[in-house]
Amino acid sequence: MNEIICFRCNSENIVRNGNTSYGKPRYMCKDCRRHFVENPAKEKISVEKKELIDKLLLERLSLAGI
Ligand SMILES: [Zn+2]
């Protein structure tokens, strides 16, 4: 049922523990007491995407300024 597994000890004994500053659900492993966010790799990709979009927007703005 619970698809979230602790990346440190592979335990399924996970509890939800509030939200991150990004509004993503935060979890805690009951076995090793480690806090983590679901799919942190996904967040990294979205940040990279955002940077790309910002870059494209910036290029567009500089083109419009010419
Ligand atoms: Zn753990």
Image (tube, grey):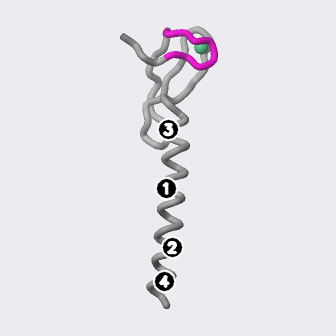
Could you tell which of marks 2 and 4 lies nearer the N-terminus?
A: 2
Give ligand 1's quarter of the image. top right
Q: Amino acid at mark 2?
A: Leu
Near-viewer residue (61 or 32): 61
What distance separates the C-alpha of mark 4 from that of mark 3? 32 Å
Could you tell which of marks 4 and 3 lies nearer the N-terminus?
A: 3
User: Mark 4 CB in 8 Å range of ligand 1?
Assistant: no
Q: Which residue is mark 1?
A: 50
Residues drawn in magenta: 5-12
Per the image, label 3 sits on a secondary structure element best described as helix
What percent of the width, then of the height, locates residue 21? 49, 42
42 w.r.t. 12: above or below: below
Q: Main secondary structure of the magenta part?
A: loop
Q: Amino acid at mark 3?
A: Lys
Q: Which residue is mark 4?
A: 63
Q: Using a 10 Å C-alpha cutoff, classify the residue at mark 3 as few (fewer than 14 neighbours), some (14 to 19) or many (20 or more).
A: few
Could you tell which of marks 2 and 3 lies nearer the N-terminus?
A: 3
The answer to if 11 sits in the magenta stretch is yes
Could you tell which of marks 1 and 2 lies nearer the N-terminus?
A: 1
Q: Amino acid at mark 4?
A: Leu
What percent of the width, then of the height, locates residue 38? 48, 28
Q: Which residue is mark 3?
A: 42
Could you tell which of marks 1 and 4 lies nearer the N-terminus?
A: 1
Near-viewer residue (6 or 31): 6
